[in-house]
Amino acid sequence: MTSLSDRTRSLDKEHYSEVERIYGDAFPLEVRFHLAHWIEDQFKPGLNIPESSPQMLLDLSHNLFAKLDEYVNALPEDHASFLIKKKLRDDLTALRMRYMNYPAALAVTVKQCLDQEAAVVARAEGKSFPPHSDAALIHQIRQTIAFLKNQIRTEISTEVNRIKQEHESINMDVYSLRDMSSNYARMVSETGENNETKKALEQKNKMQMDLTNKLARIIQRFKHLEDKIKGVFESVKGVQKEVLDTKLDAWKREQQLAGNGLQITQSLENIQEWCEGIAEILWTSRTFVKQLEIFWQEISRFQQSPTQTLLPDLMEGFSNLLSNLVTGTFIIEKQPPQVMKTNTRFTATVRLLVGGQLNVHMASPNVTVSIISESQANQLLKTPNKPNLRKEDYSSGDILNGIGNMEYHANTRQVSVTFRNLQLKKIRRTEKKGTESVMEEKFSVCFWTDFSIGELKFRMFTLSLPVVVIVHGNQEPQALATITWDNAFAEWGRRPFHVPDKVSWFQMAEALNMKWTSACGSNRGLTEENFYFLATKAFRNPNLGKDDIKNLVISWSQFCREPLPDRNFTFWEWFYRVMNLTSLHMRGPWNEGLIMGFVSKHRAEELLLNCQAGTFLLRYSDSELGGVTIAYVRQDPMVGKLVQFVAPFVSKDLSQRSIADTIFDLQENLTCLWPNIPSEMFKQFSSVAQKDTAMPASSGYVPHGLKIHVQSLTPEFSNPNTPNPYEQHMMMGNHYQEDSQETMDYNNINIGDININELLDMGVYQQPDRPSM
């Protein structure tokens, strides 16, 4: 296989220049190529160096120095190798000087350069470079921050102190030179030119030359330190972008998807640790630059043509980075509910990730809460840094208990405030857009604060995820549709709160699966068969081919505005209600794979007619919102095998009698779950398995219990001219009623044989007749 160095050498000019920029002053590219095989073996692209093994970094660095030294000494002493040998030896000396105080940083630098080089080569070759593992990226961020902090604390701090001492020495020399010049002038005026005055002149000239040399050295040291600080600025700028624009944004995106059921994997504690490290680097660097500006103002007075300095630009750069870091880390840790009911208490927590590092909590800044409309959110984000920004101008409702103070929590090192008793009392709605309902109107809860850090003043806000405000519980399903669509399909960095009107069915299937697994259990997600059934329902086409759905897009109207055919509810309402039913009453059986659920009535009949009598399955009702029906095979002596459907059970039914108990109540008819699973599998979810229902004998009560009973056929079919009841049901398309006495002769019922009192004394509970689907 061709080595990475060979592939790099064969790059076109544009990509090769990019590799040169990556290595730059960090690590000599000629060393990279001369030790190519050894470096690629030791620092494989994507190598994850254990964070708990700093010794490994030191060993790699020392081995690199030793390997380069060995390589240089092995080069022949001839004219052809002279220049190469001299250049590599100079590189070795420069590397030792640069990484003398922190040799482990050399290994980190080489690893980062090699990773970026591999990415450039892969991109140039038209390949997708495999992303690093999250653990490797976390390690890389930490190592970079640790390296910069160490460079600031040791190397740059030492240089600043040295310049300070030299500056003080120059000040003393300037005063001494002034005294010497005065003495020389006085001697000349008193005695004229003689040996003494000549000696005095020589001393004055020598001191002036020494002072000139000192000024040249300190200016050179200034420029060298400026370059180092500029290097820190570029590095910290890059790592801050990685933390804020990649890791923190990923956490925010996961937080948004958590509203649809996603489990958050990004660690906010890691992000705070990195942000605090960046804040320390920025604040310390900014302080050093401020000191150097004072020294430079005094030193530049001695120059006839003052040298241009980068210090003002660096000061502005560090200040901007610090401002972006502070405003970017003012976040909502616990979001308010996205479906918010008026006059109902809710909670929220806001947190400043760098608050502890910058001692923001010492001033105990206020945080106030308001709710704003979509248009106000757009207006606010267009002018976030407007100096006369007033939160009073952005409000679309009244929130009680919306003032708190940020505090430092020593046990967690967090600066945050939790609002525990927020309550939306009034909402001011905007004009509707077209056919938009109030359940489609989005708001955002806005948190405001202002404080100072040194001479830097901050006035900040942060917006919550979109919120839909309702006034009645029956508005919740439609409001949840708005939130589900927004959370799933909003593009990052959008203008509030723009979402696409259509999405691919693949995206929709992912969103539905996320909602379902969150509500009903992660052990069993939705399958391809489930998605196909849902697609036929969403697109109102039972004849869809399975390959057809790959290219289909579903609109917002199809999702939650347009009713399903011959129904008064939408696709989302149907899905939401069966999801709630499963979550509340059938979570266990669903996760064990005992509920098929997503299957059409026609398909259920096809599956069951190939099975023996007593085989059954559970399917979600098409006609009853939030209903589940039991379909089972029955062997009729007159018409043969047929499929019956018990009237749907809804949440009210299953809260009284679980689906497992219901199945055992009907065990004479339900013996085997399709395709061949014993019905005993439901035993673990029955009330007998969950608790002992027997009451203590000392209570004085006789125990009782409910039992499901399928309604028997009535004697009205005793007319010999009336068709067999099963035939009649088949002709009518109504399969819900069933006779529990399979061998009863309906033409020979003697009503006089029925003892009504005896039936009453039996105490058998019968549910009222179930309506048909």
Image (cartoon, helix red, strand yellow):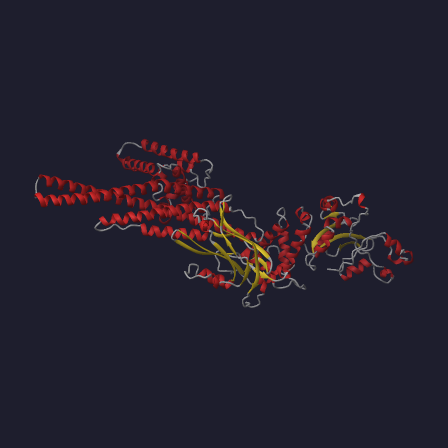
Tell me where residue 275 appears, x and y as whole percent: 45, 47
Seen as rendered, the residue at the extreme front is 190
The residue lying toward the viewer, choosing from 699 and 261, is 699
**Residue 719 figure quarter:** bottom right
The residue lying toward the viewer, choosing from 443 and 545, is 443
Q: Residue at x 57, y 67 (%)?
A: 435
Tell me where residue 92 appears, x and y as whole percent: 32, 36
**Residue 726 figure quarter:** bottom right
Seen as rendered, the residue at the extreme right is 752
Tell me where residue 655 appears, x and y as whole percent: 71, 52
The residue lying toward the viewer, choosing from 181 and 148, is 181
For the C terminus, which image quadrant? bottom right
Tell me if residue 16 can be seen.
no
For the N terminus, which image quadrant? top left
The residue lying toward the viewer, choosing from 553 and 494, is 494
Left or right: 620 in relation to 394 = right
The relative height of residue 36 versus residue 444 in the rendered view (above or below) is above
